[in-house]
Amino acid sequence: MPAKLKVAVVGCGVGKSHVAAYQNLPDLYDLLAICDVVEAKAQQVAGDFGIPRVSTDLGELCRMDDLDVIDICTPPYLHYAQIQQVLAAGKHAICEKPLVGSLREVDEIARAEAAAGKRVLPIFQNRFGHGLQKLKFLIAEGVTGPAYLTTVETAWRRRADYYAVPWRGKWQTELGGTLITHAIHAHDMLTYVLGPIRSVFARTATRVNPIEGEDCASVSLEMADGSLASLSATVGSAVEISRHRFCFRNLTAESNTRPYGNSREPWTFTGDAPEWTEQISETLARFVLQPEGYEGEFSRFYCALQDGTELPVTLADARTSLELLTAMYHSAQTGQPATLPLGEDHPKYAGWLP
């Protein structure tokens, strides 16, 4: 059997979910170390999960010869330098969203990855929910027909205590508002299903909390395939939901509305005629379940490294996400639509901060 990958996790916020996922994959990963600038947090997680090593310094992890992978779960403004540091140390990097803070930075990370001969895995774990994977399977099997219209809703609730964390709510450290921190997964699910975007028009507002970035957004998209999509995001919803609704020629696909798990089942697939309903049922009978969420992404990452195949989430995927963010912020700041793709000549290539 191939050797297990030896991994360390940096950051004890969302990093605890990563730790739990690795421990649910004991045949693939050995979790050797946990790191946080607050040592007490790292000690607590190490005790809870039986992790043998504790550190407060990423550099110390980079000097551990027996580590294969360092998983970065730190605030967004730290990601770019930390990914570069991990690659320079000769280790694979996994990094939470947003990967970095600009198109220029993701392009530089791609060059650093190639030079290092190691891999960078951006985190978009919601891609691997069984509901969304069933839709991808129906598309791959030619059942859906072309897309017409898609709606994506991210309606959550965040109050003052959430933004009491010093790095949150600030352009320089969180890199934006709800479009980055809360809706980024929902929007990645859209492009994962439908592919590239042609045009973006966005309106943003700050109405819920006294923060620097946006906490409400409404966005209109034209996809490269000619279909249309609308995105809405807020942290001012008393009832928290996430919802995707895809209208295709042959069927409509609708997610559940769980705010943090709507890529998982149940999803509803409704045929436009009885024969399409029958085709949906026959096709999904051949669908093969694989792990979901972080376990789904990490298990696929392990297999890709072993087999030398494409990663389950690539730097190109991360660039697509960052390109949409850049276009939305550019449109919101200028009041004009943004046409994609965005290249090095775009005024926001080096960053979308106002």
Image (cartoon, rainbow, N blue to C red):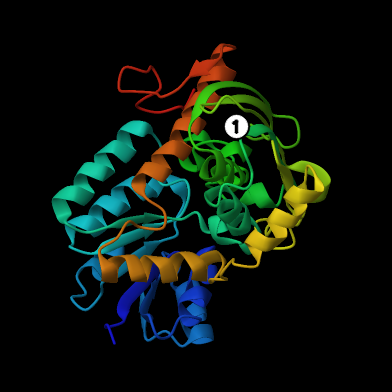
Left or right, residue 186 beside residue 330:
right
- Residue on which disc 1 sits: 212
**Whether residue 100 is visible:** no
- Residue appearing at x 38%, y 34% in the figure: 102
Picture quadrant where residue 62 is located? bottom left
Left or right, residue 142 beside residue 300:
right
Query: Could you tell me how many numbered marks the image carries?
Result: 1
Q: Position of residue 254 (x, y in %)?
A: 74, 48
**Whether residue 71 is visible:** yes
Q: Quadrant of the N terminus?
A: bottom left
Q: Nearer the viewer, residue 297 or 109?
A: 297
Local secondary structure at mark 1: loop
Picture quadrant where residue 307 is located? bottom left
Q: Residues within 10 Å of mark 1 (few under 14, many from 20)?
A: some
Q: Position of residue 208 (x, y in %)?
A: 76, 36
**Residue furthest front as drawn:** 275
Q: Position of residue 140 (x, y in %)?
A: 52, 50
- Residue appearing at x 67%, y 51% in the figure: 162
Left or right, residue 264 beside residue 115:
right
Amino acid type at circle 1 is Glu
- Residue appearing at x 41%, y 47% in the figure: 99
**Residue furthest right as drawn:** 238
- Residue appearing at x 60%, y 61% in the figure: 129
Classify 120 as above or below 149: below
Q: Position of residue 280 (x, y in %)?
A: 69, 55
Classify 128 as above or below 163: below
